[in-house]
Image: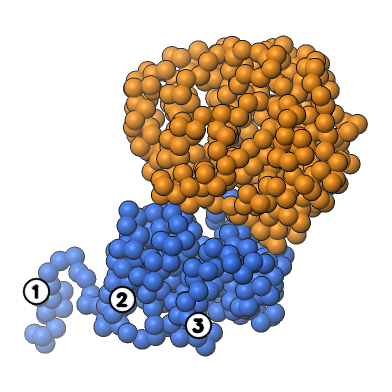
Chain colours: A orange, B blue
């Protein structure tokens, strides 16, 4: 379990190590043939800021070689905003007084049709955590509804037991996104005071359970803004390295959600600038040529357009973050605000203008039995 | 130049191509036409087998282009056999490029599952072209299993590093009774020419063309390189030597007897 490695690392020491990195550490990291976690620490450190252009150049080249002139497109399908957790930063938090909604079968089909009409073939199912309404049984039924319409289905829902994953994978589940939010254990408690999510260790070991269940793909990340992003990103990279060595048949992706304002929400404790986000994306690519890097519509149009060539390999487009947001109930409250409201077709055109092909389909159900 | 025959089908071009990583399907088509390639592989995961108007397939609709579906994404022999059967139904071809790389990071082929799948698919009447490590013994085992060709890698896929497995490719080419197609790692026309000079029957190139600044020009460059390399091989290369050989210091004495 990753816990064994995690407990050998002390947050404050890791943080001090990153901030102590010097220009020569960065130069060594840039020159390395294969980069280590220590190199990654240098590349995300303040000392690397003057080297951003060179990092971007290498990142672009490595990404182009591996992924070609392509960008994977995906879209979230929010199934429910019911949630038993209190999370200080989330629009769906239990103590947030919003109208709660869970889509029924007919409503899911309406949303599916709307998403299919946009051209998507990969979909990400999203819910809050509410065992009574959106538990395993709900997911079984949702997958049965969604599966005939999409080549690739991922989920971003509450962490589950290994046996649950083992059951859902044959029903069409390809990937699971589970963000640790923060690897700062004490602060994690502060941000998740109530609900099952307050169990730090259960969440931390979710990727292990997914790996043991044989999932095809998992997505990692932290919520940028809760804690020092450099230290949190180092822990994410540590986690990634452990997972790649342990569950070597699984594909990995990293996301970079920056804390966005929502009604009644928390202001970011730590602000991350655009420049720093680019630094982080490039650092991941320099560490790992193969990992997928994903950027959501939390980010603004003009900025997303420029990220295309800097290492990102997957983008959401045309997203709504509220259950029923595409047709059923457009006015319900979303999890976070969308900054890039362009349609999927507009994103595909933007990519085309930059010499990139939008990839709508990159998996086929016939490849797994 | 002699044509290449695989499973009774003749190919004038010894350059096989891939369809991934291009910036558009239209550019892919243009590059493939410029390459002169007659065998093009396409990932089942990228195409919609149920849809006639699939963007990639539409652009591959040329009588001289032989479609070679590949199983990229499967992790086991069982999955590969299942995918090949569906592809045969949907795409109406019994040719299959067997790619079983359970490791999604370096996409390195699993020799055990590949052998099992080749045995099974050959029995089911498929023309099997397996992507494998440059492993001479595995090549012989695949031959016995009924493979139509072998496709050893020159270097990790997409790496453009050239013929890192040179010594093993030489052994494979020397021993093989089926065509040998160097599949991965070819990053420059000179690499392709080198493989052909060695006696490889064909090469497969994707990334080096798709990611080039001008994929159409690069496709032509590979066409010329493959032709040059093959012609050189058929012409019988003069042996290279590290030093000029002017006399025979060790054996000249024999003339004195």
Check the picture and name the quadrant holding the C terminus of chain B.
Answer: bottom left
* Chain ID at mark 2: B
Q: Residues within 10 Å of mark 1 (few under 14, many from 20)?
A: few
Disc 2 from disc 1: Cα separation: 34 Å
Foreground disc of the pair 3, 1: 3
Check the picture and name the quadrant holding the N terminus of chain B.
Answer: bottom left
Above or below, comparing residue A137 to residue A302 in the picture: below
The residue shown at (41%, 61%) is B27
Q: Nearer the viewer, residue B191 or A124?
A: A124
Asked if the residue at tag 1 contacts the one at tag 2, i.e. Cβ–Cβ closer than 8 Å, the answer is: no
* Chain ID at mark 1: B
Disc 3 from disc 1: Cα separation: 45 Å
Q: Residues within 10 Å of mark 2 (few under 14, many from 20)?
A: many
Residue A264: x %, y % from top left: 70, 14
Residue A211: x %, y % from top left: 71, 41
Foreground disc of the pair 2, 1: 2
The residue shown at (39%, 22%) is A48
Asked whether the residues under marks 2 and 1 belong to the same chain, the reply is: yes
Asked if the residue at tag 2 contacts the one at tag 3, i.e. Cβ–Cβ closer than 8 Å, the answer is: no
Q: Nearer the viewer, residue B6 or A168?
A: A168
The residue shown at (63%, 37%) is A319
Disc 3 from disc 2: Cα separation: 18 Å
- Kindly state the secondary structure of the residue where label 3 is placed: strand
Read off the residue under disc 1.
Answer: B246
Above or below, comparing residue A75 to residue B240 in the picture: above
Asked if the residue at tag 1 contacts the one at tag 3, i.e. Cβ–Cβ closer than 8 Å, the answer is: no
Residue A101: x %, y % from top left: 82, 31
State which tag comes first along the sequence, 3 or 1. 3
The residue shown at (49%, 70%) is B60
* Chain ID at mark 3: B
Read off the residue under disc 3.
Answer: B6
Read off the residue under disc 2.
Answer: B227
């Amino acid at each position: 379990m990753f816990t064994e490695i995690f407990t050998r690392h002390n947050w404050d020491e890791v943080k001090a190590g990153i901030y102590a990195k010097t220009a020569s550490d960065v130069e060594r990291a840039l020159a390395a043939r294969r980069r280590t976690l220590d190199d990654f620490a240098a590349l995300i450190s303040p000392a690397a800021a003057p080297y951003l252009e060179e990092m971007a150049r290498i990142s672009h080249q490595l990404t182009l070689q591996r992924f070609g002139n392509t960008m994977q497109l995906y879209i979230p399908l929010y199934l429910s905003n019911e949630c038993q957790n209190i999370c200080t930063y989330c629009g769906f938090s239990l103590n947030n007084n919003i109208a709660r909604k869970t889509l029924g079968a007919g409503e899911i089909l309406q949303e599916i049709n709307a998403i299919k009409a946009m051209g998507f073939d990969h979909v990400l199912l999203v819910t809050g955590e509410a065992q009574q309404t959106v538990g395993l049984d709900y997911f079984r039924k949702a997958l049965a509804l969604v599966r005939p319409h999409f080549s690739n289905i991922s989920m971003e829902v509450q962490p589950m037991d290994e046996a649950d994953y083992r059951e859902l994978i044959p029903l069409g589940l390809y990937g699971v996104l589970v963000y640790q939010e923060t690897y700062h254990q004490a602060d994690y408690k502060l941000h998740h005071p109530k609900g099952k999510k307050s169990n730090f260790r259960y969440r931390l070991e979710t990727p292990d359970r997914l790996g043991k269940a044989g999932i095809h793909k998992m997505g990692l990340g932290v919520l940028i803004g809760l804690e020092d992003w450099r230290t949190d990103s180092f822990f994410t990279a540590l986690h990634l390295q452990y997972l790649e060595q342990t569950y070597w048949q699984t594909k990995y992706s990293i996301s970079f959600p920056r804390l966005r304002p929502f009604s009644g929400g928390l202001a970011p404790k730590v602000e991350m600038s655009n420049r720093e986000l680019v630094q982080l994306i490039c650092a991941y690519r320099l560490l790992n040529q193969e990992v997928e890097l994903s950027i959501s519509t939390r980010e603004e149009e003009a900025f997303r357009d420029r990220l295309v060539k800097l290492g990102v390999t997957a983008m959401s487009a045309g997203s709504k973050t509220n259950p029923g947001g595409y047709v059923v109930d457009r006015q319900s409250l979303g999890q976070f605000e969308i900054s890039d409201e362009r349609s999927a077709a507009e994103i595909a055109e933007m990519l085309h203008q930059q010499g990139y092909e939008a990839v709508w389909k990159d998996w086929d159900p016939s490849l797994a039995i | 130049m002699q044509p290449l025959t695989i499973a009774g089908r003749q190919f004038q071009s010894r350059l096989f191509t891939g369809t991934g990583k291009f910036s558009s399907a239209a550019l892919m088509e243009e590059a493939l036409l410029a390459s002169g390639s007659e065998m093009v592989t396409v990932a089942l995961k990228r195409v919609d087998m149920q849809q006639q108007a699939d963007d990639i397939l539409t652009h591959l609709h040329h009588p001289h282009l032989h479609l070679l579906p590949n199983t990229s994404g499967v992790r086991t022999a069982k999955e590969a056999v299942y995918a090949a059967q569906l592809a045969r139904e949907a795409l109406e071809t019994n040719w299959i490029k067997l790619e079983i790389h359970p490791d999604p990071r370096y996409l390195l082929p699993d020799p055990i599952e590949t052998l099992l799948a080749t045995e099974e698919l050959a029995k089911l009447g498929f023309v099997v072209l397996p992507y494998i490590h440059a492993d001479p013994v595995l090549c012989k085992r695949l031959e016995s299993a009924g493979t139509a060709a072998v496709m050893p890698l020159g270097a990790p896929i997409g790496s453009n590093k050239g013929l890192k497995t040179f010594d093993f490719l030489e052994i494979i080419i020397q021993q093989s009774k089926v065509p040998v197609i160097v599949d991965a790692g070819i990053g420059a026309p000179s690499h392709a020419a080198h493989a052909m000079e060695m006696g490889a029957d064909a090469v497969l190139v994707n990334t080096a063309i798709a990611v080039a600044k001008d994929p159409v020009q690069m496709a032509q460059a590979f066409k010329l390189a493959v032709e040059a390399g093959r012609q050189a091989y058929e012409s019988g290369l003069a042996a290279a030597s590290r030093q000029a050989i002017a006399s025979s210091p060790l054996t000249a004495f024999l003339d004195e007897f």
